[in-house]
Image (spheres, rainbow, N blue to C red):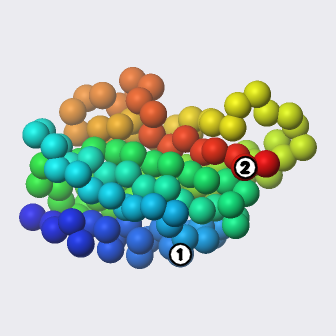
Amino acid sequence: MLSDTTIQHMIRWRLETVPGVCGFLRGPEIEHRRDCVHVQMWLDIDNLELTLHSAFQLKPNPSRCEVLNEIDEIEAGIKQARLQHKWTRFVPKQSGWITLPGTGLRGRWDGTAGTGALNHPALSDG
């Protein structure tokens, strides 16, 4: 079983090396719920040009591989958000929130993938 500290370290270690990530504004926060482990964080992307919020849930006793899979999804979301923001920077936005593709709030472990669960919204400060 992975400890909360180990999960937080895995997330920080992987995401702090992603191009554009300037640091964590809050989190990663880990909350143990009745049927899952809920994880959420807020990231500073490109010196607050974007603020990315990510939330996901893991099985009660997640494996290292399951945590790494979720981190990979977040990393892909960061890359997509940066690219999308770069090309739409001068286009007026109706809303600062965008939803990026991912595996959904519960990933692939309970069959809810693809149900439209909010996974990687990005908030533009500009």
What's the amino acid at mark 1?
Answer: Thr
Say whether residue 125 is left or right of residue 111: right
Q: Earlier in the sequence, mark 1 or mark 2?
A: 1
Q: Is residue 28 above or below residue 111?
A: below
33 to 70, vertically: above or below: above
User: In this view of the protein, which residue sits in the foreground, 70 or 4?
Assistant: 4
Q: Compared with residue 108, is residue 7 higher up or lower down, i.e. above or below?
A: below
Q: Is residue 96 left or right of residue 13?
A: right
**Residue 116's quadrant in the figure?**
top left
Contact, mark 1 vs mark 2 (Cβ under 8 Å): no
Give the residue type that dot 2 points to.
Asp
- On the rendered structure, is 33 left or right of 12? left
Q: How many numbered marks does the figure carry?
A: 2
Per the image, the residue denoted by label 2 is: 125
Q: Residue at image x 17%, y 55%?
A: 62
The residues tagged by marks 1 and 2 sit, at their Cα atoms, a distance apart of: 22 Å
Q: Residue at x 65, y 49 (%)?
A: 81
Q: Nearer the viewer, residue 104 or 52?
A: 52
Q: Which residue is mark 1?
A: 17
For the N terminus, give its image quadrant: bottom left
Q: Which mark is residue 32?
A: none
Discs 1/2, front: 2
